[in-house]
Amino acid sequence: MKWWPIEKRDADLERELRSDLELEEEEQREGGIPGEEVRYAALRAFGNPALIREQTRAVWTWSWFESLARDLRFSLCTLRRTPGFTVISMLVMALGIGANVALFTVVRGVLLKPLPFQDPDRLVMLYEAGLHEDDTAGSNVVSGGMYDEWKKQNRGYSSLALAQGIRVGLSGSSGQLPEKLKSALFSWDLLRTLGVQPALGRDFSQADDSPAANGTVLLSWGLWKRRFGGNPDILNQTIELDAKPFTVIGVMPAWFDFPDPSTQLWTPVYYDKPEDTMTSFSDHMFRVVGRLKPGVGAAQGVADLSIISQRIHDTHLNNPFVFRSARSRPLLEHMVGEIKKPLYVLLEATCCLLLIACLNVANLLVARAAARRKELAIRTALGGSWLRLIRERLIECLMLSAAGGALGLLLAWAALHWLMQTRHDMTRVESIHIDGVVAAFTVGVIVLCALFSGLIAAFSTSHKRILGALHEASRSVSGGSVRATLRKVLLTLEVGLTVILLIGAGLLLKSYERLRSADMGCLTQDVITMHLGLPDARYVTPVQRANFYDTLLERVRALPGVDAAGFVTAVPGQGDGMAWIFSIVEHPPSPQGSGLFALSRWADPKYFGTMGIPILRGRTFNGGKRLDAANETIISQSFANQYFPGEDPLDKHLRVRGQTAVIVGIVGDTRYAIGETPRPVQYYPLDAGIENVGTLVIRSSHYLGQFALPVERIVSEMDPDLPVSDVLTMNQLLGKSTQDQSFNTTLLVAFAALSLVLAAVGLFGVMSYIAAQRTTEIGIRIALGAKREHVMRKMLLDGMWPAVLGLVVGLAGSLAVGRLMRDLLYEIKPLDSAVFASVAATLLVVAAFACIVPAWRASRLDPMQALRTE
């Protein structure tokens, strides 16, 4: 029988049931039952034909499939009858699932996927540490001398290699303009350490990585495509970088971007850097990558390096900047360290959003079940089992989740596409894509959402309560106090989670506003900056560099609309730049192994006025002193407070790198990075001709964008192969440095806003269902004399109680969440009272608006019409 066609099998069953029932009727007739009672007596004796039919089908093979198909058809018809409920539930699920899938894809691609290197678990980033004996934390980049000793003496690493990010100027050719590019210096064996080969051409050889070699360069895939049209004949061709010839020996794979996502060129480090830099123990500028030997743990490897560092430190006690130990961290952790916590916070936010969506749908399902209680009771009385009804609920919820999940997957794809367009500079962005694992995760989320929402709705009505609905004479209790209580509990949880998200978003938003409004110690309005770098190959002497800056500033200041112009090696917010050790001639020598340390800047005399940095005492540089005669220095306020407490620093002398300079002025403090505490700064005259890289600043009350082309034209006339890069206003420069904080804050605020909308929709929907279920009760109250405003107040209070309780629960949960976010906040406390008060007020206002419309409609019911609805 099991292989017969379904239609024939059902027809045979119907004929058999009919025949058996007719025989039973004949027996009842022979027993003396009157004609009109024979049918009912036969049915009582025979049993429920529908139940017998279901039980018979249950023992047939594949009957579960038929039953499932019927349940699917029934659920589809049920959902079609309530399009409003169906569409809202699908959209709510789509938002929750889509946000979750998108963030999971990002977290998996950036944080969880192994690096695309050979045996990535054995790769570590190494640092110097323990500058002072009592140092317990802190890590520093590595000096060339220490790297060389580690490489020679270590026993725990199969290879050590170093890298440094720099910027180079690519000269124009074939009608193309020169441009400034991010580049990296590699030791010749770094690619071998990582286990990577060029996609085209060859790797560096040991012979390439020496001062006597010819210049060689590897191109990024993007630069090769963009600048050279993807022409394979570029191999063995010569390009000019900083006015020096380099032979292209290879092109890296499209996914390779070490050590920075925007790196476009790689050149050998020992070819580029002078020997004294590569053997110095004081110039800390390199990142060192190590590959652990098989069987050697990270702790064992770094302990070996610490022994070497201590030995070097003990033999260089006169050098205060030789570190005494080493530290390491997995290479993956180093690459994603700054974005790891924000991404996990965002993922947790999307989990909260998904839970809110599930609670929202569950609440709507519970309210909808209350509206269908009579239908469910009749079906149960006719033989339908409680488990069958639960299965129908779950299938119905699974269909909603599946439809919402499909739409959510499309939303996730769109969100990821937007992310990769707007944050292409994010670490490991090339690893972010939807694949089989993400699809499986989506299916799992869909099933979990269906089970969570469906089971809550299914178990909201027990078998006894379903049958009890047949005895209800009216809808006066809105589907039962148990269901009403469950709906309020679900709403309370939903509102509580919404409050947690809102407070987290509020804290980040206020922190970001504080960060952007931080006083940088200089003007940030009406100032534009442009980066320039003079290649050593063409600007060999200090005279050439000083003359270039003098001519450039003279011509820029003559441009129409320019109020002031200056030049400095690094403007506030552009990073710490260079830092030098120094001594104070009038003070006793520092103890052995210690020294004084401050950030160093080179600036022209008018830079301070251009940037609005106040000269607190003394004067600016003497513009008549140039080159060796430029022996003046200006210090910042924090420099004076730290190194000249209780004395006048003017006319005192600083000794830096064998040169002596007199202090002629004290200027206000500036921040080297937004959000950082001002550090001591020493300024030296640009006219000394020492530095070849810096930033041109222009202040004007006119439109700042108009100066980009004229300045580029001036620079091109002075040196056709010199690119101008990073043309940014000060506000844009600071905004670029806070891009990560802005991105994280924007996403969290968006998730919090979505959760608030979902909570409001859930509150409105449930209140509307409650009002509909209590139509008869409200009609009786009004008919018996209850005032409409009292009815409205009671309905409003019924809806506001879950919101108030959820607010209390959310505020309590936010106390813990705020502490977890402490590291992401700037100059605000995790328990900021203004944020908590604003969130509480916002939520209560939104909840009141969500409840007031259903409450107002309920108070306007016509008593006679309401009584007739029963």
Image: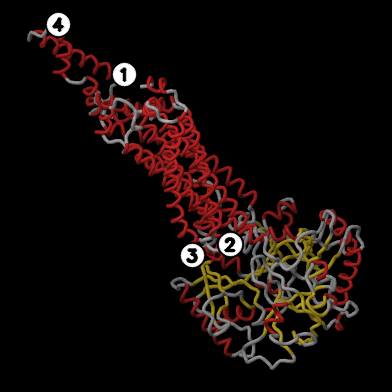
Query: Which amino acid, by three-letter code, is at mark 3?
Result: Asp
Q: Which x, y percent locates residue 233?
A: 74, 54
Residue identifier under label 1? 7
Q: Amino acid at mark 4?
A: Gly
- The image quadrant where one finds the N terminus is top left
| Circle on res. 121 | 3
758 and 471: which one is in front? 471
In the image as oriented, which residue stretches furthest toward the front? 785
Closer mark to the observer between disc 4 and disc 1: 4
Farthest residue, direction bottom:
588
Dot 1 amino acid type: Glu
What is the CA distance from the residue labelled 4 to the residue labelled 2? 93 Å
Mark nearer the viewer, 4 or 3: 4
Question: In terms of image quadrants, where is residue 864?
Answer: top left
In the image, taking residue 755 as reference, residue 141 lies left or right, namely right
Judging by the rendered image, the residue that carries numbered circle 2 is 196
Q: Quadrant of residue 803?
A: top left
Task: Quickly name the residue at label 4.
Answer: 35
